[in-house]
Amino acid sequence: AQSVAQPEDQVNVAEGNPLTVKCTYSVSGNPYLFWYVQYPNRGLQFLLKYITGDNLVKGSYGFEAEFNKSQTSFHLKKPSALVSDSALYFCAVRDRGGSNYQLIWGAGTKLIIKP
Amino acid sequence: GAGVSQSPSNKVTEKGKDVELRCDPISGHTALYWYRQSLGQGLEFLIYFQGNSAPDKSGLPSDRFSAERTGGSVSTLTIQRTQQEDSAVYLCASSLRQGGDNSPLHFGNGTRLTVT
């Protein structure tokens, strides 16, 4: 069965420190990979995606993610965390091609940045 | 507007009543999704529209739930005879094209439904 795992329910980081939010996937083929962020009482916002090419993808708000095919991972990173980065983060994958419209979502990771 | 708009933003209803939730997607977006999210939890897929057609209704929890989309634009999600377990945030999202591509989803801010 296809799945996306975000192994940490919550990640705590001190402001100014680097942060990593982990995502691994089990999907056949070569999927598209996405990260979304959800601030309190808001819908999800698209952060970045991996399509092809460079394994390091840069996105909004200074975030980046590294695609690792051998480890089937797509971890979200930021060199220096801000308190305003505190939010719920979701990893998602979609199979390429055909009529597959469905996104497979991780359960989400709550990121808390402490001043 | 520039984004996905959902209304109402909050809805409190009594158990047994019917409710209608509305979603206005971004103009030109052919794909539309409804998700349900319990407090601080993950996303539960409900239904997907491509144009006015719903090729996948597999996520609708029961026959009390239905959805339609008209003119390839506005969508309404209807819950009949609401139950307390229906309480959640209902999120709508749209994207430019249909599946198999890398278009990101654009989400509305959701409708928070509380069934008392």
Image: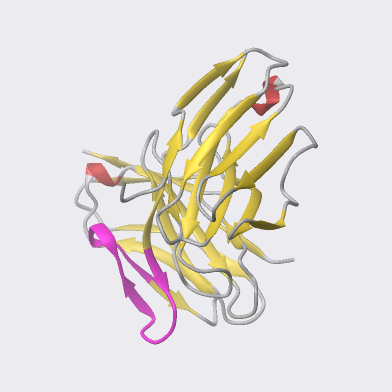
Q: Residue A112: image x %, image y %?
A: 35, 41
Q: Toward the viewer: A23 or B102?
A: B102
At 33% from the left and 63% from the top, the residue drawn is A77
Q: Residue A11: image x %, image y %?
A: 41, 47
Quadrant in the picture for residue A84 = top left
At 76% from the left and 32% from the top, the residue drawn is B64
Quadrant in the picture for residue A38 = top left
Quadrant in the picture for residue A114 = top left
Give the extent of the magenta segment: A48-65
At 40% from the left and 33% from the top, the residue drawn is A41
Q: Toward the viewer: B78 or A88?
A: B78
Q: Residue B61: image x %, image y %?
A: 75, 39
Q: Toward the viewer: A87 or B59?
A: B59
Please tell me whether residue A23 is drawn above or below residue B115 in the rendered image: below
Scheme by which the image is coloured: secondary structure
At 74% from the left and 22% from the top, the residue drawn is B81
Please tell me whether residue B17 is drawn above or below residue B38 in the rendered image: above
Please tell me whether residue B60 is drawn above or below residue A20 in the rendered image: above
Asked whether, in this view, residue A27 is left or right of residue A52, the answer is right
Please tell me whether residue A90 is drawn above or below residue B18 in the rendered image: below
Q: Residue B84: image x %, image y %?
A: 68, 20
**Residue that sits furthest to the right in the current view:** B63
Looking at the image, how many numbered discs can be counted on the residues?
0
Q: Where is the N terminus of chain A found, in terms of image quarters?
A: bottom right
Assess whether residue B31 is covered by the magenta stretch: no
Q: Where is the C terminus of chain A found, in terms of image quarters?
A: top left
